[in-house]
Image (spheres, rainbow, N blue to C red):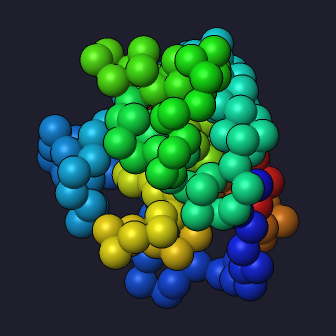
Amino acid sequence: MIPAVAIDIDPTFPADLDRGLPDDEDVDEEGYGYFRDVWTIGEVSHEEAVSMINEERRLVSLVDHVSRTHAEFKAIAKAVEVGEPDCLPAGYAAQPLDSELLRIVGDYAEDGSPLDALELGVAGLSYALSSVGCFTAASCRSHCSDRSWSDRPVIFFAAERCPLSNGSLRWYVKAGAATQTAGSELIDC
């Protein structure tokens, strides 16, 4: 049971919003902005992004299939994300050993996360944004705990914007390390 939440979307930007990619001196080993305990994903190829999206889709489907409530979904998702069987709902680990999710959680208990320490629901999009030159700052799936800093899934990222002759705006996304308009993508917004 994938959790759902009703969200009122406001497409406007705050008036004092810093726009564009961060300067090199504003980025350190923890990323940028006022976020802590985060890391820079770095350059991601199209193939890496597609692979992450497919793996996330597979894992979300597995978690959705076995969870009966939103709280169960979030607990099982956390167990998968961190490779920690203790995060599973009570009694879940006592299921038959042929459970694919139990194998996944057990496999990553020693090796780390199947989603490079990102969370189900934000991993694929984080990689997709990085693959087109956006700089992700932080992401959160939202959690059933006091530790959650967001009440809904969210990804904070930076991208360049450029005005068009018709007065509208488009996101300017750098293609690789290129900084020229040629070879870049424009995404309507």
Locate the N terminus and report the quarter of the image it occupies: bottom right
**Nearer to the camera, 60 or 101:** 101
**At 49% across and 35% down in the image, what residue appears?**
93
Q: Quadrant of residue 100?
A: top right
Mark count: 0
- Confirm whether residue 23 shows in the render: no
Residue 164 is situated, as x and y percent measured from the top left of the image, at 75, 58
Q: Nearer the viewer, residue 124 or 157?
A: 124
Please tell me which residue lies in front, 110 or 89. Answer: 89
- Does residue 31 appear left or right of residue 49 in this picture? left
The correct choice, above or below, for 87 with respect to 69 in the image is: above
Can you give x and y, in whole percent of width and height, for residue 181 in the image? 62, 34
Q: Is residue 64 left or right of residue 108?
A: right
Task: Kindly tell me whether residue 10 is visible in this rendering.
Answer: yes
Residue 21 percent across, percent down from the top left: 41, 50
Residue in front for this viewpoint, 184 or 164: 184
Is 110 left or right of 122, judged from the image as shown?
Answer: left
Question: Quick check: 103 above or below 83?
Answer: above
Q: Position of residue 118 (x, y in %)?
A: 44, 39
What's the residue at 31%, 16% (across, down)?
111
Q: Residue at x 76, y 36 (%)?
A: 61
